Image: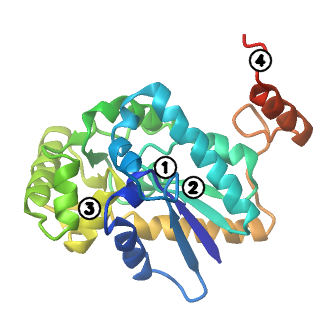
C-alpha cells in the first residue's frame, strides 16, 4: 500500500521535520506500506521558509495552499497512491479534494476529533498561532463537533521554539504545552488533548508524552495511518464516498476541462 502525506511548506523548510515524520510513522508502519511525505511544493528555498506559518493568517493567501494541495492529491492518484493524508491541522482542501479523486483522502483535524470522541468526553486542540483560530473553529463546526470541543488552547511559544525543539532543545516547548493543556483541563473539563500543528505531535511523541494529569494526549499518527489503510481497504471492497450533493459530487470531466480552460485563457471575462 502506498500512502501520500500532504503537508504545508513547513514540511520542507524546517530542517529535520520530514525525517521526524517518517521516523514516527515507522514505529507503526506495516510491512509493505510505503509512506511519502510532501510539502505543497517539493523544494527547500528562502521563499518557502519565509511564508511558512505566515500565509495561513490571511484568507486570500490560504486559498493558494488549498489549490496546490488539491492538485497534489490529484497527482497522488495519477501516480498510483492508495490514499492521501492531509497532515495539516485545519484540513485545507479536504472537502474539495474528496470531490475530484476516487482514492481516499483523510484529514489530520477530522481524524483527530473522531478518535478523541472514542477516548474521552471533551477535547481541545493545543496549538500555536492564535491567528488561525477562525480556521480551526470553522473546521470544528463543519465536522459537527462543537458540542465535544472546548476552545482551542494556544501555547505561549512560537515557530522558533518548535524549531529549537526539533533541534534537540524542547524545554520551552514542553513547558508551554503543559501550561496551555492544564489550563484547558481545569477551565473547560478537557480530558483529551489533541496536538495542533502536526509538528507538535512529532515533538510530543519524541518526548514520550501520552497522558497529562489523567488526560489522554493523542498520538494522531497511529489513527491517521490506520484510517488511511482502512479506507483504502474499503475502497478495494467496493465502498467509496458519496457522490450526491454539492460537497461530494464529482464534476464531469468535460465540464471540469471547460472551467479550467476558461479561467486559464488570458482576457477571458470575469464576473
SS class, disc 3 = strand
Disc on the earlier residue, 4 or 3: 3
Q: Residue at 58% x, 48% y: name it.
A: 69
Q: Badge 3: few (under 14), some or many (20 or more) residues near its Cα, within 10 Å? A: some
Residue 168 position within the rendered picture, expressed as x and y whole percent measured from the top left = 16, 71
Q: Badge 4: few (under 14), some or many (20 or more) residues near its Cα, within 10 Å? A: few
Query: Marks 3/2: CA distance?
Result: 22 Å
Disc on the earlier residue, 3 or 2: 2
SS class, disc 2 = strand
Query: Marks 2/4: CA distance?
Result: 37 Å
Residue 159 position within the rendered picture, expressed as x and y whole percent measured from the top left = 23, 49
Task: State if disc 1 and disc 4 touch (CB < 8 Å).
Answer: no
Q: Which residue is mark 4?
A: 267
Q: Is residue 162 left or right of residue 156?
A: right
Q: Nearer the viewer, mark 1 or mark 3?
A: 1
SS class, disc 1 = helix
Q: Which residue is mark 3?
A: 216
Amino acid at each position: 500500500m502506498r500512502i501520500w502525506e500532504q503537508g504545508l511548506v513547513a514540511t520542507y523548510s524546517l530542517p529535520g521535520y520530514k525525517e521526524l515524520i517518517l521516523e514516527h510513522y515507522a514505529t507503526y508502519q506495516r510491512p509493505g506500506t510505503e509512506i511519502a511525505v510532501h510539502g505543497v511544493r517539493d523544494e527547500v528555498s528562502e521563499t518557502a521558509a519565509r511564508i511558512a506559518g505566515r500565509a495561513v493568517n490571511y484568507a486570500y493567501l490560504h486559498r493558494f495552499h488549498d489549490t496546490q494541495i488539491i492538485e497534489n492529491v490529484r497527482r497522488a492518484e495519477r501516480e498510483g497512491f492508495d490514499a492521501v493524508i492531509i497532515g495539516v491541522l485545519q484540513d485545507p482542501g479536504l472537502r474539495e479534494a474528496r470531490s475530484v479523486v476516487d482514492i481516499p483522502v483523510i484529514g489530520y483535524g477530522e481524524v483527530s476529533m473522531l478518535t478523541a470522541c472514542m477516548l474521552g468526553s471533551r477535547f481541545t486542540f493545543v496549538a500555536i498561532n492564535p491567528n488561525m483560530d477562525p480556521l480551526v473553529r470553522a473546521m470544528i463546526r463543519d465536522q459537527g463537533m462543537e458540542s465535544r470541543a472546548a476552545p482551542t488552547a494556544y501555547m505561549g511559544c512560537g515557530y522558533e521554539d518548535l524549531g529549537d525543539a526539533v533541534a534537540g532543545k524542547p524545554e520551552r516547548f514542553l513547558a508551554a504545552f503543559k501550561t496551555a493543556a492544564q489550563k484547558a483541563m481545569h477551565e473547560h473539563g478537557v480530558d483529551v488533548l489533541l496536538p495542533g500543528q502536526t509538528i507538535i505531535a512529532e515533538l510530543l511523541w519524541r518526548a514520550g508524552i501520552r497522558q497529562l494529569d489523567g488526560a489522554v494526549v493523542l498520538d494522531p499518527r497511529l489513527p491517521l495511518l490506520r484510517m488511511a489503510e482502512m479506507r483504502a481497504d474499503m475502497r478495494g471492497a467496493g465502498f467509496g464516498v458519496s457522490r450526491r450533493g454539492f460537497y461530494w459530487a464529482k464534476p464531469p470531466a468535460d465540464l471540469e476541462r471547460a472551467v479550467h480552460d476558461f479561467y486559464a485563457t488570458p482576457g477571458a471575462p470575469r464576473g
